[in-house]
């Protein structure tokens, strides 16, 4: 059977499943609508490490309407399926997926939505151990019907296999129509905090310039942090940036054998958010052998949130990463300094690839809909 034909059959079956779900919830529009995105069946005939596996892109629209209307994305979930496009497969084959709003419609959106941070281009990144994002009740990300979205997925194969592996990725996006809601949703926007590690030979400058003063962060772990700064700049896809002190750094690096602590003082929040805000959903992106990722408020000395990762005992894969989800929220303050701390424990005898990103979904207090027209 050809891959395109298989994909069409999978899409038709998944559409019927989504239709059954919507029919089951009936008139309870608070439960939302479901759109299913499915990838091609991808073949892995050798070892594919993180960021190097087969990939696929699905372009989709959540809802086609004559006139753009406000939709609220409440949840997204990704699952690995087998070669038949239906049976569940091991999550160890999931590398990551990104869900992007590729059609901003700036002219029309200003008339419908007003100024907003909520319709950011990058919306979701799902990773091993964190394959579902579901916001707390009453919170969601606003988009417009007719917006075009790119769902980019990648699979990986961390171990040698006797036979090629064929898997796909199914993604379920849950949304609500604003015109059907009895209560107004609270809009969220995404703030991604990336751990950046200095390239080899620049650890001292990184410590003295980026972590100096009373909030010096590297002194206790200087030895392991310096030893762990393995240069991955040779990989073309790895972005290299410079800190304000001129230190070259990367957000994707190799971790040598052993336990290592990576500390990165973030740029001032005044450059990231226009006002104090509360985070209502937080999760972390860690690769296998990652132990934890913590956001620390250096101004108060308190931990804002610490995510812990559990790895499968018999697979090179992350089983679960803890998250934060609450209607109460955690304040993120513009005039405070913050640091992010990642811990990896590489129990192998080889260097392993790594990343450490914390995703915060903040309440966009300035977001509004100038005129709301309810459906009849």
Image (cartoon, grey):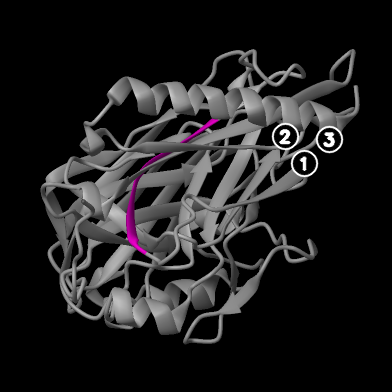
Density class for disc 1 (Cα within 10 Å; few <14, some 14-19, many ≥20) is many
Q: Is residue 136 left or right of residue 193?
A: left
Quadrant where the image shows the N terminus:
top right
Q: Residue 94: x and y, percent?
A: 63, 32
Predominant SS of the magenta segment:
strand
Q: Residue 231: x and y, percent?
A: 70, 62
Residue 195 visible in this rendered orientation of the protein: no
Density class for disc 3 (Cα within 10 Å; few <14, some 14-19, many ≥20) is few
Disc 2 + disc 3, Cβ < 8 Å = no
Residue 120 sits inside the magenta stretch: no
User: What residue sits right under mark 1 in the picture?
Assistant: 53
Mark 1: secondary structure: loop
Q: Residue 174: x and y, percent?
A: 39, 39
Which of pointers 2 and 3 lies earlier in the amino acid sequence? 3
Above or below, 173 relative to 93: below
Task: Give the residue displayed 50% in from the left and 81% down from the top.
Answer: 243
Disc 2 + disc 1, Cβ < 8 Å = yes
Mark 2: secondary structure: loop
Task: Give the residue displayed 76% in from the left and 36% down from the top.
Answer: 40
Residue 156 bears which disc, if any?
2
Mark 3: secondary structure: helix
For the residues marked 2 and 3, what is the alpha-carbon distance in whole angstroms? 22 Å
Region in magenta: 69-78
Q: Is residue 246 left or right of residue 51?
A: left
Choose between 102 and 266: the one closer to the eye.
Answer: 102
User: What residue sits right under mark 3 in the picture?
Assistant: 4
Q: Quadrant of residue 207?
A: bottom left
């Amino acid at each position: 059977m050809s891959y395109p034909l298989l994909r069409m059959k999978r899409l038709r079956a998944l559409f019927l499943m989504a239709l059954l779900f919507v029919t089951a919830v009936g008139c309870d529009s608070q439960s939302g609508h479901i759109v299913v995105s499915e990838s091609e069946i991808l073949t892995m005939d050798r070892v594919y490490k993180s960021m190097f596996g087969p990939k696929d892109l699905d372009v989709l629209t959540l809802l086609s309407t004559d006139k753009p209307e406000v939709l609220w994305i409440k949840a997204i979930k990704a699952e690995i399926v087998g070669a038949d496009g239906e049976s569940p497969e091991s999550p160890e084959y999931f590398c990551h997926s990104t869900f992007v709003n590729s059609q901003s419609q700036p002219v029309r959106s200003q008339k419908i939505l007003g100024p907003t941070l909520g319709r950011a281009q990058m919306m979701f990144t799902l990773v091993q151990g964190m394959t579902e994002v579901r916001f707390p009740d009453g919170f969601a990300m606003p988009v417009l019907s007719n917006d075009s979205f790119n769902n980019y997925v990648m699979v990986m194969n961390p171990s040698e296999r006797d036979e090629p592996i064929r898997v796909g990725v199914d993604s379920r996006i849950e949304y609500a129509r604003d015109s059907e809601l009895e209560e107004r949703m609270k809009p969220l926007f995404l703030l991604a905090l990336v751990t950046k590690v200095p390239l080899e030979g620049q650890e001292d400058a990184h410590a003295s310039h980026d972590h100096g003063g009373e909030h010096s962060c590297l002194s206790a772990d200087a030895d392991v942090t310096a030893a762990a700064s393995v240069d991955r700049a040779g990989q073309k896809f790895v972005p290299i940036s410079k800190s304000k002190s001129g230190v070259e750094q990367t957000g994707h690096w190799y971790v040598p054998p052993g336990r290592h602590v990576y500390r990165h003082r973030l740029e001032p929040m005044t450059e990231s958010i226009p006002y104090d805000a509360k985070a209502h959903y937080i999760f972390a992106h860690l690769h296998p052998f990652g132990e934890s990722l913590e956001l620390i408020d250096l101004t108060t000395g308190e931990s804002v949130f610490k995510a812990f990762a559990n790895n499968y005992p018999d697979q090179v894969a992350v089983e679960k990463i803890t998250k934060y989800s609450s209607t109460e929220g955690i304040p993120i303050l513009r005039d405070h300094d913050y640091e992010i701390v990642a811990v990896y424990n590489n129990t192998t005898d080889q260097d392993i690839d790594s990343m450490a990103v914390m995703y915060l979904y903040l309440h966009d207090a300035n977001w509004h809909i100038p005129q709301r027209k309810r459906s009849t």
